[in-house]
Amino acid sequence: MYCGECKKECEGDWIDVGIGSYEYWGAKGNDVRWVYVSKCCEGDVFKDKKCTIPYEGPDEPDEWEDDYPEDDYREDDRDWITKEEQNALENLGIDTDDMDVRDV
């Protein structure tokens, strides 16, 4: 393998270049984007010395799913509903008697 930056023979490694935890219109998520880069310059890795044939890297291990704590994936950490939400749920025929309702 060869580094696309310094053009020298290299070893590669996976790095996460995703933006990480985010919130978009109330929806929480965790952006993960693994890319295989050279260890020397963190540049693109190629199969040939002329750096024309990209090397995609070995298969991504399944254990990467465990790299982030579960709470990074939670959608909502609130365990209560507002009066307005209670009214909307009851209008849909959903029983809210066992829910924690707060007047906010």
Image (spheres, rainbow, N blue to C red):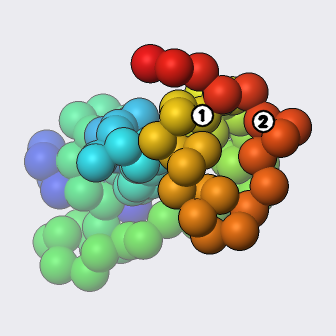
Quadrant of the rendering where the C terminus is positioned: top left
- Tag 2: residue type? Met
Q: Are marks 2 and 1 in contact (CB under 8 Å)?
A: yes
Name the residue carrying label 1.
81
Picture disc at residue 28 = none
Looking at the image, residue 62 sits to the left or right of residue 77; the answer is: right
- Tag 1: residue type? Ile
In the figure, 76 relative to 46: above or below?
A: above
Q: Position of residue 99 (x, y in %)?
A: 78, 36
Please state which of residues 45 and 88 is positioned toward the viewer in this rendering. 88
Looking at the image, residue 96 sits to the left or right of residue 60; the answer is: right
Q: Is residue 8 visible?
A: no
Spatial distance from mark 2 to mark 1, Cα to Cα? 7 Å
Residue positioned most to the right: 98
Name the residue carrying label 2.
99
Please state which of residues 99 and 14 is positioned toward the viewer in this rendering. 99
Q: Position of residue 57 (x, y in %)?
A: 49, 65
Q: Position of residue 35 (x, y in %)?
A: 39, 55
Q: Position of residue 100 (x, y in %)?
A: 74, 27
Q: Secondary structure at mark 1?
A: strand
Residue appearing at x 36%, y 43% in the figure: 26
